[in-house]
Amino acid sequence: MATAGPPRERIIREATRILAHGAQPSVADIAKAAGVSRTTFYRTFPSRAGLLEALELAPEPGARQRALEVALRLLRTQTLANLSMDELAVESGISRANLYRLFPGKTALFRAILIAFSPFEPVMALFDRLQDRPPEDVVPELVLTAYRTVAGRAGIARTLLLEATSRSPEFEQAFRETALRAFGRLAQYLAAQMAAGRLRRMHPMVAGQGLVGGVMFHVLIGPLLGQAMVDGPNGEEVVTQFANLWLRGMRPESAD
């Protein structure tokens, strides 16, 4: 246990020593090694992340994207709850300290994965541009935007389904901050179009799931089904047909 020097100096010295040995110390571990109380630690640094920032362990350029790519690959075979941040650091070729500077925990990591690889952010940007346009204009572009975002990355769709069934706290928080916002925007748009008489009236979340479900299913197993089809439509043609089928099914009753 280190006792020489002011508390801040001892905390930084001991944290550097522990991190250099590849450990993943808690605040309690660092405080004990530095010979200070947790109260003293938090008087010196606002958080564990604040300490890491003070250590000036700047990640190398590209480390963040590399860690996200590796995390998405690891999540193909395990849940977020079982994901080892230590393994992620090793597989990404970055230190644990830098990993935690980039992503203070699994919630932050998964939120970053959803922002980087899922269609939620592009979908919200689309509604910012087209929120006043009729469904015939918006829905086909919506499904194409979502499909193009995840095309070739079926792993993100599988990960979403797997994590949605696991319902871990980390997933639920990250999902609320990204996906639910996107679904909320979609529901608001559909409700407005229903009120304007352009779409069949039903709960907008049900209508939204009906639209998203076919696209998600195609992303997951479309390539396998394509092997059994001769001269079948390609990915963008398939999801556009889904959009058109949905639009026909959602025509107002008066238009039937």
Image (spheres, helix red, strand yellow):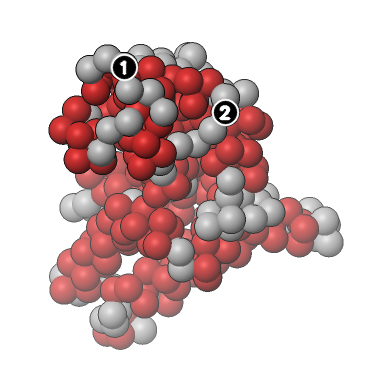
Q: Which mark is residue 126?
A: none
Which tag, 1 or 2, sits closer to the chain's start?
Answer: 1
* Quarter in which the C terminus is drawn: bottom left
Q: Residue at (39%, 49%) from the top-left corner?
A: 107
**Element assignment for label 2:** loop
Q: Is residue 176 above or below residue 195?
A: above
- In the rendered image, residue 135, in percent from the top left (x then y), is placed at 31, 60
Q: Residue at (36%, 74%) from the top-left corner?
A: 207
Q: Which of the two residues, 117 or 5, is positioned nearer the viewer here?
A: 5
- In the rendered image, residue 168, in percent from the top left (x then y), is placed at 45, 64
Q: Which residue is mark 1?
A: 4
Asked if the residue at tag 2 contacts the one at tag 1, i.e. Cβ–Cβ closer than 8 Å, the answer is: no
Q: Residue at (37%, 69%) from the top-left corner?
A: 208
- Residue 239 visible in the shown view: no
**Numbered disc in front, either 1 or 2:** 1
Q: Which amino acid is tagged 2?
A: Gly
Q: Which residue is mark 2?
A: 22
Q: Name the side, left or right, on which 238 lies relative to 129.
A: right
Q: Name the side, left or right, on which 24 lies relative to 206.
A: right
Q: Which amino acid is tagged 1?
A: Ala
Quarter-wise, where is residue 250 in the image?
A: bottom left
- In the rendered image, residue 82, in percent from the top left (x then y), is placed at 58, 55
Q: Is residue 81 above or below residue 55?
A: below
Q: Name the side, left or right, on which 184 lies relative to 74.
A: left
